[in-house]
Image (cartoon, coloured by chain):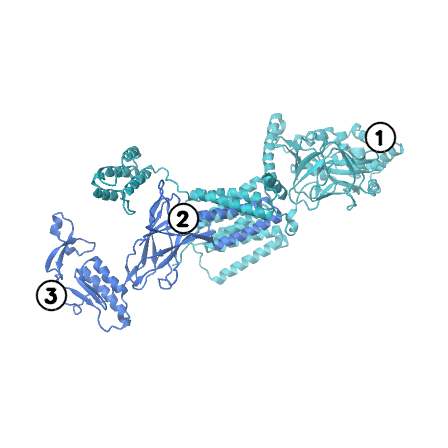
Chain colours: A cyan, B blue
Amino acid sequence: MRLSEISLARFSPALLWLYAGNVLAVGTHIPRIPVWISLLFLLICSARLFYSNPDGQLRQHSAPLMKLLAVTLAAVILAGVWLSYGTLMGREAGISLLILLTGMKFLEMKTPRDYHIAGFLGLFLILTGFLYSQTIPVAVYMLLSVGVLVSALIACNDPGRGLATVARLRLAGMLLAQALPLVVLIFLLFPRIPGPLWGMPRDANSGLSGLGEEMSPGAITRLIESDDIAFRVKFEGGTPRKSALYWRGPVLWTTDGVTWVRSRLRRAAPPRVTLDGPGIAYTITQEPGPSSALFALELPEAPAERAFFTHDYQIRSQQPLDQRKQYSLISHTRYRLESGAEEELGLALQLPYDYHPRAVALGRSWREAGLPPREIVRSAMRQFNEEPFYYTLAPPAARSDLVDEFLFETRQGFCEHYAAAFVVLMRAAGIPARVVTGYQGGTLNPLDGYLVVRQRDAHAWAEVWLEEGGWTRVDPTSAVSPARVNEGIEGALPDSILDMPAGFAGSGFLGDVWRRLRNTFEAIDNRWNQWVLSYDRNRQARVLRGLGLGTLEWEGLLLTLGVLTGLILTILGILMFRARPRQGDRARLLYDRFCRRLERIGIPRRSHEGPDDFARRVGTLRRDLARPIEEITKLYIETRYAGRQERLVDLENILRGFRPRKTAA
Amino acid sequence: MRDAVVLERLPLPPGAATERTDRHQRRRIYIFFTRPGAVYCLMLMTMLVGAVNYNNSMAYILCFLLTGLFLINILHTYRNLRGLIIHLPECQPVHAGERVRIPLVLENRSPIQRIGIRMDYAPEGAPGLPPGNRPATLLPDLAGAGLQSAAIYLAPLPRGIYRPGQFRISSTFPLGLCRAWSYIDMDRECVVYPAPAGIPRLPEELGHKPREQPGRQAGSEDFTGHRPYHNRDPVRMVDWKKYAAGQGLLIKRFSGGGTGELWLRWPEGIAPASAERWLSQFAMWIIEADRQGLAYGLDLHGLRIEPDLGEPHKHRCLRALAAHDASV
């Protein structure tokens, strides 16, 4: 006799739960993958629901036909993925293949082993979803999917269908809940190995937004429209005032009249700096971005770990920033920045040939007037301040020369226009100047004390070389729109761009409510980022130091982990295996006590004896006890089997006086 | 003989400090991962490598969550068997050609449900059942705190007396990643009588003394007393007068005095090849004689059962047939 261990009958619970779990696991990929893959997956899986007979066996077809069908399907899948992605390797194509493989496994499963493998493939698909998003909602969704797949495995191992749906879900929930302490423990203590172990597929970080390495017209404007977070800052002391919050990013030297790019002096040594005033210590958690620039408050003492200074004093990471990165720095807002390389000053005077003639003429005129550099800077700023310049996000599109048109015709522009025009003017006047891009300002979340810097805080300013002061920051935008620097971007822009729903924007009160709600969500999100998503080697080392385990190497960590896991399992085991008194079965409890008293005088109840038989036997053995025993038995049967709970008190009373002795009185 | 097996540990009733355990044989529970469990562990490794490579915290968490589930699952699988008591009642004899039923009574003293437990034949050493007979049974699910009867069915066996030997009781509930198992000695005799076949008419030539008056049962000459009624005693031997007097069902007993007894004697010189047919014929006669209420005796070579009546006697005779060594 072959034992049918698993019921995969049409619409059996095991089949339906596995179906639901696998579809949920694929769910997060559906918006990303080609539509035909989702449809084919659903088709294959749904076919299986109908494909089995009511008795649970697959329909009988000739084996060669089935084999031909499977081979054809596999060929179609491979060809389709190749056509969609141009490759079978890489992350995207790999995941698509995995999805369809899961579908095929689901279609052909016959034995419990197949069933388990199909479930495991679903669990693995959930993991691949995390490569794209790790936010809290995604995590919750994934946890639910895991719960459904665990329920499916339970259904598979419950061939007698002893558990109802609710009981099965409760058991799945209990298993997950009991695993939770282990998850926390292993997550905290499992030694973190700095990845990657091998080269990532090329498509591993496509489509990251953020400040790039170049500045072309509209580049920063596009960022301003984004509400995404660039990085978060936790200051150890107080937060410096907003106007001092210049977050230095890529420094741009060379322009072709349209786009500004970084210097070619890649290998030059970092410059000397003289730092003054108290140091400001802070930790930055930076979101993944397209460049390897790290951002620091002007100016930092030393580069972060696994990062270095360039000759124009920007910090660059040694690895691409394809993941969130956390680093700690100490900055001083009062400083003197020296020139880094010999060629620097020459490079900072170059202008593209035959571009911006009017601006160059204006700059030359200042130099020919014999003004000292400081005065020239001042007159350029006065120009922006006194002439009718406007700070706007939607400047008219340039028709010909970007800088000339902005300076002399439209006079409407954004920080990138002001910074570029200013640097052109300075270079024309013979003052070495360069564009600095980065972020300015940030929003303090009062709930958790983190300063949040968004893409919208992207900014561009200028640095000029002055003999007496070294490289000096000049922010031409502040001459036009002081609010941009003093109050941050939100002061300089209308509400409509601040991602606030229309109803909230008009009213001050609702605007406040909106801001508070957003602060709360972001504080939770930040805690999640800080503690879960950015939990790396450094943070683990800090946690271990806090626990007094700072000296442990990975062997010691694994040992500690093993011991603590064993401890948790032991405690759980004790809780699970401890004999629990039957709840609400007081009558049985009392009757057990009665039986123990009789056992003590040498009359144990035999396992086959019902209460009546037992009473009759004891009655014949001990005539003196027959009466109370008959009464107790009657009361017990009434309370336990006839549901007369009110007689429980009588049973208790009579039992209290029942103290049989070994010999008849 | 101990009539029950307890897995790992006898659960104590609440409040009791100790309980007599001498009626139970205790068996250890073993636990190891199943093949899907091994695949699962491989998948965990792959997940860990992926998490390290992409330095993906949620991948780490998922990997650790599934690791935790695996560990927790061990406890649950173990608990599914722990403290289960299996009572082993006697096996009812059957005739060859019928399915042998090994009855079990499962006792669950804990409040948890026990689910998906199966019994497989796993003899230690020489199997007590012929090859091809490998019973495997899914036991019924057990609700919290209660008794449940179950049975293992063997495929039809040739006549004989079998001691099946060891069974494996196992479960992979809840997740199928681990299997907990233990062994239970079916220290039980499964008696398979020869299938009754042949001529139903009772042999006169084999009888010691042929019946003198058809219709009158043998051994009814001298009334010697009464004995209590047993199930399946011939109805016509009931003393109805006593029953009417309110004394219950009593069977009249007679001293046979050597008259009217039927002796079933194993004929001389039977070829071993036809021995089985003769055994079936004997079984047929025993059943027929019992039905007619005749006292009958059995004389196989080297085994003699004095003529008697009644259910226990019939089973003694049939059992002797089942155990008969036809080669002598």
Chain letter for mark 3, please.
Answer: B
Which residue is label 3 attached to? B212
Q: Is residue A521 left or right of residue B234?
A: right
Q: In this view, does A610 lie to the left or right of A80?
A: left
Question: Split into 4 quadrants, where in the image is the C terminus of chain A?
Answer: top left
Question: Which of the two residues, B317 or B53, is positioned nearer the viewer here?
Answer: B317
**1 and 2 marks on the same chain:** no
**3 and 1 marks on the same chain:** no
Residue B166: x and y in percent read: 37, 58
Q: Distance between the residues labelled 3 and 1?
A: 152 Å
As drawn, B19 above or below B320: above
Residue B132: x and y in percent read: 38, 63
Chain letter for mark 1, please.
Answer: A
The answer to whether the residues at label 1 and label 2 have Cβ atoms under 8 Å apart is no
Residue A30: x and y in percent read: 57, 46
Residue A625: x and y in percent read: 23, 39
As helix, strand or loop, the secondary structure at mark 1 comes to helix
Name the kind of residue labelled 2 in the image: Arg
Q: In this view, does A356 lie to the left or right of B28?
A: right
Furthest-left residue in view?
Answer: B222
Labelled disc at residue B82: 2
Question: Which of the two residues, A415 or B302, is positioned nearer the viewer here?
Answer: B302
Q: Which of marks 3 and 2 is in front?
A: 2
Q: Is residue A149 visible?
A: no
Labelled disc at residue A524: none
Which residue is label 1 attached to? A375
Question: Which of the two residues, B192 or B27, is positioned nearer the viewer here?
Answer: B27
As helix, strand or loop, the secondary structure at mark 3 comes to loop
Question: Which of the two residues, A74 or A245, is positioned nearer the viewer here?
Answer: A245
Q: How far apart are marks 3 and 2 (CA)?
A: 65 Å
Name the kind of residue labelled 3 in the image: Glu
